[in-house]
Image (cartoon, rainbow, N blue to C red):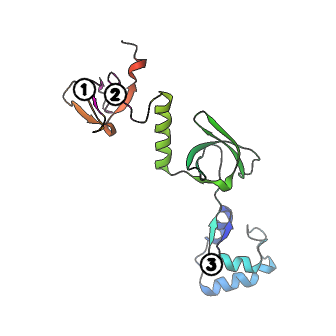
Amino acid sequence: MEKIQVTQKQADWLERYELTQEQIDHYINIQPYKKRPDSPIVDWDAAKLARALYVGYEVIPQYKVGDWVVYVPDNSIWEITKDTYNDGTHINLMNGNEIMNVVSANHLRHATPEEIQQEKKRRFWERLGREVDEYRQGDIVTTGFGNYTSITKLEMNKKSVYFDGPEAERSFDEIYLVAPEEQRMDK
């Protein structure tokens, strides 16, 4: 038997109580009498409530403008730009310069924080016309401690950069691009 789909509000209602078997039976028995008109499950029949409490339920994801989502058919990451019908079921997405109009929420899932971070990094490097972590000789980088320096040598296979100074070698994970070589004003 499949779990039933519920809204977040319905799930919150069901989770309000840690129920004993006796309490579950009681709620199932009184459900048809609709004794709680303020309940988000007031329109459920006893069978649906029983399935939710015995089999379980899954919360239907809610999406809003600004959320980062994964378009499941191709695993691409998008940002929600518009809720077409203001109900979270059909939305517009943007991925850098690409736009996808009126996508069904059934084809989406929320992106994880790691996926969002990777996508933002990909978009940053894409705006520069480079692959992710495509550092170049002459780029200005920082290690995050107020020290700015120019890359003098790269070793792509080691994912390392070299520059003059006391800390002459750093991995890509330890540096941040400040100014790409082609945009430097001091050259």
In magenta stretch: residue 142: yes
Q: Is 187 within the magenta?
A: no
Q: Nearer the viewer, residue 94 or 25?
A: 94
Mark pair 2, 3: CA separation:
55 Å
Report which quarter residue 100 is drawn in: top right
Residue at 50% x, 45% y: name it.
Answer: 116
Could you tell me which secondary element the residue under label 1 belongs to?
loop
What segment carries the magenta color? Answer: 133-155
Residue annotated with mark 1: 163
Q: Quadrant of residue 57?
A: bottom right
* Circles 1 and 2: CB atoms closer than 8 Å: yes
Say left or right for 93 vs 114.
right
Q: Which residue is mark 3?
A: 55
Main secondary structure type of the part rendered in magenta:
loop
* Label 1 to label 2: alpha-carbon separation: 10 Å
Q: Name the residue at the left extreme.
A: 166
Query: Within 10 angstroms of label 1, few (less than 14), some, or many (20 or more) residues?
Result: some
101 or 166, nearer to the observer: 101
Q: Which mark is residue 115?
A: none
Mark 2 or mark 3, which has the lower sequence index? 3
Q: Residues within 10 Å of mark 3 (few under 14, many from 20)?
A: few
User: In the image, which is nearer the foreground, mark 3 or mark 1?
Assistant: 1
Q: Is residue 59 above or below residue 127?
A: below
Quarter of the image with the N terminus is bottom right
- Give the amino acid at mark 2: Val
Tell me residue 30's x, y (percent).
75, 82
Q: Are marks 3 and 1 in contact (CB under 8 Å)?
A: no
